[in-house]
Amino acid sequence: MSTLPPGASAPRVRIAPSQADVARLAGVSGQTVSRVANGSESVLPATRQRVLDAMNTLGYSPNSAARALRNGTFDTLGIIVHKLARTGESRTVDAIVTAAHQARHTVTLVDVESPSTDEVTAAATRLSHQAIDGLIIIRAELERTADLALPADLPVVVSDSQFMGQLPSVGSDQISGTRRAVEHLLSLGHQTVHLLAGPQDSVPAGTRRRAWADTLAAHDRPIPAPLQGDWTAESGYAAGRAVADDPSITAVFSSNDEMAAGLYLALHEQGVRVPDDVSIVGFDDVPLATYLWPPLTTVRQDFGAIGKELVASLLTQMAGEAPARDALTLIPTELIVRRSTAPPRRRP
Amino acid sequence: MSTLPPGASAPRVRIAPSQADVARLAGVSGQTVSRVANGSESVLPATRQRVLDAMNTLGYSPNSAARALRNGTFDTLGIIVHKLARTGESRTVDAIVTAAHQARHTVTLVDVESPSTDEVTAAATRLSHQAIDGLIIIRAELERTADLALPADLPVVVSDSQFMGQLPSVGSDQISGTRRAVEHLLSLGHQTVHLLAGPQDSVPAGTRRRAWADTLAAHDRPIPAPLQGDWTAESGYAAGRAVADDPSITAVFSSNDEMAAGLYLALHEQGVRVPDDVSIVGFDDVPLATYLWPPLTTVRQDFGAIGKELVASLLTQMAGEAPARDALTLIPTELIVRRSTAPPRRRP
DNA sequence: ATTCTCGATGTTGACGTTAACAACTGCTGG
DNA sequence: CCAGCAGTTGTTAACGTCAACATCGAGAAT
């Protein structure tokens, strides 16, 4: 009998039944309960039923911490992500969760405030203190992973390809997507294509920018100074004012759909018609791209495939295969032609 | 000396160092390592430093499974979500992750294919087999939780308010948001407001529908038959064709922004002007709402606040406070007036 | 000088599970 | 009639951590 001070309540007891409780009720050993829980063959049907019944009455579910401790595995994948609310990020995570589920794994999420080395390292440490068997890093805008302090034996995959040669990566084929976007505009008769660029320190933004310039160069076209954006629709709007003021611009390739939407608004406000006066191509194919006015021609990224591939790569590593440090899986992109592009027309 | 058969390789050993390894290297007991790891006061500075050094050289991080087993707590929150890629969902999850982080908790994610009772139960079971201290269910379209088989002692919160009286809930104040949207249109001079409804089996869709009807009734206006949608822009587009064909419709309240975007497209295609011919109000305030043409008047939901509140409620329960089964936290909504609404004009 | 106190550190055992092995049963085949 | 076998069930120990208690030593108080 414990003596509690007056007014004190008994500690809240987690009444989770254990294997031993089930064993006692079913009149078997704990080991047999374990066998039933894990679907072992060598249990008499009658015994199995007795155990199953006991589990049900008690509401037993195995303690995963004990199981993890015993097995040395958590059946859990960690994800480090920055700005989960963004289209690409949330769709990738969605796909990861689904793929992980199919592989009977759970997913643990950590959000970083900025995708800097320090933050990602901290997040990775925090995660490895938690229970994970593998780690997925989504779109960290880092220069290199050398500075990234990761547990040596932890399988890791990175989305987007800036870690090529350092960590296994999975990313969209942005180069060919960009090329097709630019060439689509060129083939319509535009003399050149202006770029609405993503932020300077973003790796994918840099990739798209280079691919844009390379494509123009390959066709012997002038390479205009890029308009600078930061992925937000707001920055696209700002750029749109500039575009509206410059009648020489007939075609713009926006590094993502959000900025294209901002561009649209500025152009509409200034009475510049799309695609009659200016043709626009975006990147991503967000769900709403079809429903902008006019429906946006854009480069579709297959985020679902990326998520699936990330998980597949991680599972391979976890199965013990030596990770090819320089493995890069490229997911194809696709140009979706809608109604925001047309042959150039002279503007007044 | 173990003798391996020729050709056999040693098993892949997870070389994660344990407390004991650190203790040996630092020349202290495991308990002292534990004390240092958990920031106990009563360790001599010199000793602490020696332990810290040993931790660093070995790359030690405490085994969370063992810790969880010992402490009976996982510092982890589980989330069950359907269609993570949607705006509201991903923003809510984002906020949850951030709030959980601040409370030094990790977040584990499970996606269900459909928000049905069976699926949610299965997911909850799966999660409780995993390591969680509390559960957040986002927008399950269930009638009641009675059927939901949840571990009895597991703290749970639900987003959206359909579980009122059954489980603690957090949700937007959809009723007043809807009322303000409808009254805004009425105050502009519209005789009545048509509804573009969400799917029949969705609880929030039902809430908005009732609030819409109630508001019209309160103002003695006719209540037209709702246009039926399913949350997708595509369904909004279909409804838009009908709206374009019916000149008597001057104002539409769309149950979400996506459907409003679909509506826009159909109307633009048919040459029906917004807001000149038809006024439109949406719900959610997705990031792109400002950048539709014309910028969409809509009811803003504060998903960030919802996520924060969900975590707060869960933490309270986990701290041992008896959950008020009927607790309902209502997060205010806000009408954002942009340019898709105007006084009615006669259409030809 | 002796006892007391207190702070630092060590020892022990338990959390719930499962692999490895041991033990027991009933049956087959000689 | 018994060795041996296969199939079922039980026993033991260990995974890594930490709370509770035990121990030790040094200085304070008498």
Image: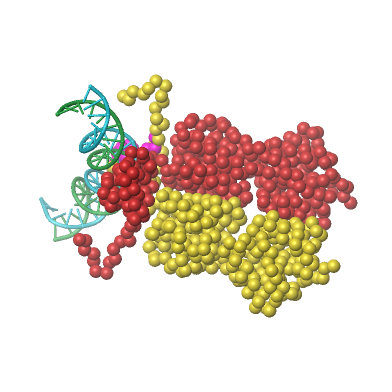
Chain colours: A yellow, B red, C green, D cyan
Q: Which residues are magenta?
A: A15-28
Q: Quadrant of residue B204?
A: top right
Residue A156 highlighted magenta (yes or no): no
Residue B66 as seen in the image, left or right of residue A237:
left
Residue A295 as seen in the image, left or right of residue B311:
right
Residue A20 highlighted magenta (yes or no): yes
Q: Quadrant of residue A103?
A: bottom left
Relative height, residue A267 to residue B24 (above, below): below
Residue A174 as seen in the image, left or right of residue A341:
left
Of B111 and B322, the residue lying toward us: B322
The quadrant in which the N terminus of chain A is found is top left
Relative image position of residue B299 (x, y in whole percent) = 70, 43
Relative image position of residue B285 (x, y in whole percent) = 68, 47
Q: Quadrant of residue A214?
A: bottom right
Relative image position of residue A152 (x, y in whole percent) = 39, 59
Which residue appears farthest toward the top when viewing the image?
A6
Residue in the picture at 72% in, 41% down: B335
Relative image position of residue A231 (x, y in whole percent) = 64, 58
Total number of numbered labels? 0
Residue in the picture at 82% in, 70% down: A346
Residue in the picture at 76% in, 40% down: B182
